[in-house]
Amino acid sequence: MAYGSTSSDTIFALSSAPGRSGVAVVRVTGGSARDVVQRLCGGLPEARKAALRTICDPESSAVIDKGLVLWFPGPCSFTGEDCAEFQVHGGRAVVAALLSALGRIEGCRLAEPGEFALRAFENGKIDLAQAEGLADLIDAETEAQRVQALRQSEGALSGLTEQWRAELIGAMALVEAGIDFSDEGDVSDNAVQEAERIVGRLVSEIGEAIADQRRGEILRDGFQVVLAGAPNVGKSSLLNALARRDVAIVSEEAGTTRDVIEVRLDLGGVPVVISDTAGLREAAGKVEEEGIRRTLKRAEAADLVIWVDDGVDPRLPEGGFSGVAGSTEGEAGRFNAAVLLVASKSDQVQRAVGGSGSQFLEISTKSEEGLRGLVDAISEIALSRAGTGEDAVITQARHRQHIGRCQAHLAAFMEMAGEIELRAEELRLAADALGRISGRVDPEDVLDQVFGRFCIGK
């Protein structure tokens, strides 16, 4: 659908998960919602109180089900319009009959994905950042993701950016006063100096928010871990051990893993995506060469690289690493992530005490020796990068982009000498950038991206 303009139709959708369930929830919103409830139930329940009703097909009068009906008159509803909820038995036939009956009422149609939330946005019940938080809350898989998404859906980001925007508007007013009273030097200079003081403080605050190591995005999208190393060192066995199931093929034949294989884990509330990759060596063919290329590409974008070696004297990759949890140099410099060194197959190999392997965390996927320590190490690094969801402000690339633009315009304002009109324009552009986060300024270009993520019925 075109998300820039919602029609005046009354919309309905199954809002609970599809398939068999104890209870199914069907939602209705729009100008005809009152009439819909009266036609299906023979009357209107008391507002915001659940009432047991017999729900009938308005055309044939056949009973569809007995269930709870809730009535939420606008504007005191999620969408700001008249809304109703039908809570019926969750059998497929019951849900199909109710949706069919609703679809045959004139002016009613099935909702598009995210259309309920879109109407809430258009009616001022939520802003754009809150809508994104609501979508993230629905998608949340871990406790930390839930906490972060809930904070955003309740306006944590919106409140902060709107506070910055309000201060910017105050600075803009001072600069405009400086323009209006340019013939009175003292008044103009004092107004501009006060605006510079406000902007200087905002530059510092916004800079701190941006310098967060992408904590919010990492928690939202998952902490990316890549298993890397030479062929046949036990990367696929390690992936299976961490996943507690067989997700990767294990073989003594070198080059078995050609494509990237992923598993998602919940480690201490942080979503962790672990990727098994092709072994790094001189490729034996075009397919393996492509697998190695994908390995290096994935490792470049990772948050953590686990370098796996199983030799009697396990070695760092050519060029070495600057530290167990630091950036890399030399040939390994293509890894821009933290690095964890793992020596696998400790049940098969007797290593010299105090050798080069002392930097490696020794594990065995067969006996599970050292696995708990490895999981704890991954969890510690992931938690230090992603946090618990309580302190992140920026949770999406879109937010970071607009806050970064605001920061650039503020920096231009502070660096610019004279030309007070041009400096005022920089402040206007900075305020507009912040306004785009909540949807106050020209939100149409991002509506498809935001509301298209929702399921039908939300």
Image (tube, rainbow, N blue to C red):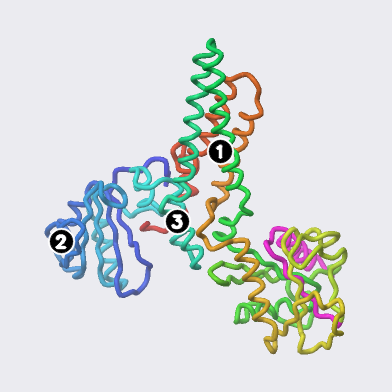
In magenta stretch: residue 89:
no
- Identify the residue at the far left of this view: 42
Which residue carries the number 3 mark? 151
Q: Secondary structure at mark 1?
A: helix
Q: What's under tag 2, amino acid-wise?
A: Cys
Q: 130 or 384, which lies in front? A: 384
- Quarter of the image for residue 364 reads bottom right
Q: Secondary structure at mark 2?
A: helix
Q: Secondary structure at mark 3?
A: helix
Q: What's under tag 1, amino acid-wise?
A: Leu
Q: 85 or 318, which lies in front? A: 318
Nearer-N-terminus badge (3/2): 2
Q: Is residue 144 left or right of residue 119?
A: right
Residue 169 picture location, percent across and down: 47, 31
Which residue carries the number 2 mark? 41
Magenta part of the protein: which range?
Answer: 284-312
Label 2 and label 1: CA atoms lie apart by 56 Å
